[in-house]
Amino acid sequence: VDLKSCTSRGLTIQSGNRTIRNKEVVSEEIKREMGLHDDEGKRKRGCVDAKWTGKCTEIMESDARFLLEFDKVQNGLQKAWGSKDYLINPFQVICPLCGEIRVISKMNQPQEIINHIKDAHESKMPSASSVAMKRLQAWKQNNFVTEQQLDNVAELSPELLKDPTTIIKNPMVRACVLARGIVEGAV
C-alpha cells in the first residue's frame, strides 16, 4: 500500500490529520486581494469600488464551503427580492431601495444590508423597507422557505425595488452610485 499526502489551497492532509483554513483567514485574504483592506487589516477609503479578481475566485474556489454559502445567499436574495444580482460578490451587495453598493464586512452575511435598510430607509420609505426587511429576515430564519411563503409574509411588487442589472451592466451608472456612496459617507 502506497500512502501519499495530498495538498490543496484550503485543505492539507498529512499523516491522517486534516487542517482546514478557517473562514476569517480566507475572508481577510480575499478582502486584501479586492482592495477592501490593507495589509494591516484596516478598511480603505475606496472600499466601495473594490474589484473582484481572478485570484479572488481562485481563493473562493479553494474551499467548497464558501461557494455553497455564496450560492445559498444568492438564492435567498432571488427568493426574497426577486433577483440574485443584488449580491455582486461575497463582500458587496446592492441595496434594493436606493441602489447603493454596500460592503458586507463578513463574507456572505446579509445582516449588514438589513441594518442599512433599517437605518437609511425605514423613515423615508416605510412600506418598501418593511417589505424588503421582512422578506429577507424570513428567508434568514428559514432558508428553505418558498416564494409563496415569503409572499404570505410580505407581498413583493415589481416596482417596489430597484433593478440591480442597470447598476451592474452599465459602468457609468455604477461609477455614479459609487461616487454618491463616497460623498454621502457610505464608506
Image: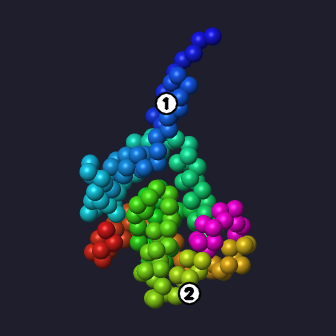
Query: Percent position (x, y) of residue 155?
Result: 66, 80
Of the residues tagged 1 and 2, which is closer to the observer? 1
Query: Percent position (x, y) of residue 142?
Result: 66, 65
Q: Quadrant of the C terminus?
A: bottom left
Residue drawn at the location 65% of the way across and 62% of the way down? 143
> Is residue 169 visible from the viewing direction of this image?
no
Tell me: 144 left or right of 78.
right
Q: Which residue is mark 2?
A: 127
Residue drawn at the location 40% of the way across and 42% of the way down? 55
Three-letter code, disc 2: Ser
Three-letter code, disc 1: Thr
Magenta span: 135-147
Helix, strand or loop for disc 2: helix
Which of 172 and 90 lies nearest the eye of the viewer? 90
Query: Percent position (x, y) of residue 136?
Result: 58, 71
Q: Quadrant of the N terminus?
A: top right
Q: Which residue is mark 1?
A: 12
